[in-house]
Image (cartoon, rainbow, N blue to C red):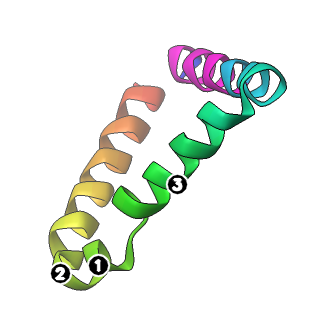
Amino acid sequence: MRPAGFFIGLFMLLLGAGYLCRPDKVSSFNSWCRNNLFSDRHLIISRRKTGVLLIFSGLMLLLLALW
């Protein structure tokens, strides 16, 4: 699980630097995520596919972390 923590930490570091240096880019990225990734439209249309994908991904990450 060490590489996952590294990448999450790196993402948070870059995001923090973006908030300090280029808040306009972070704001546009935030609106893009809100419109495309976290839209209720995806939940309504493909909830079963998304749920199965998330469960499968979570199990794979847990198995890799424990193995």
Are the residues at dot 1 and dot 2 in contact (C-beta closer than 8 Å)? Answer: yes
Residue 24 appears in which quarter of the rendering?
A: top right
Where residue 14 appears, x then y in whole percent? 67, 18
Q: Residue at x 38, y 48 (%)?
A: 58
Spatial CA distance of label 1 from label 3 is: 15 Å
Characterize the local packing of mark 3: few (<14), some (14-19) or many (20 or more) Cα atoms within 10 angstroms.
few
Mark before the other along the chain sequence, 3 or 2: 3
Which residue in the protein does label 3 denote?
Answer: 31
Residue located farthest toward the right when viewing the structure as drawn: 20
Spatial CA distance of label 1 from label 2 is: 6 Å
- Residue type at the position of mark 3: Ser
Which residue in the protein does label 1 denote?
Answer: 41
Residue located farthest toward the front when viewing the structure as drawn: 24
- The answer to whether residue 54 is above or below residue 48 is above
The span picked out in magenta is 3-12
Q: Is residue 5 magenta?
A: yes
Residue located farthest toward the bottom when viewing the structure as drawn: 44
Q: Assign the C terminus to one quadrant of the image.
A: top left
Q: Which residue is more in the foreground, 4 or 21?
A: 21
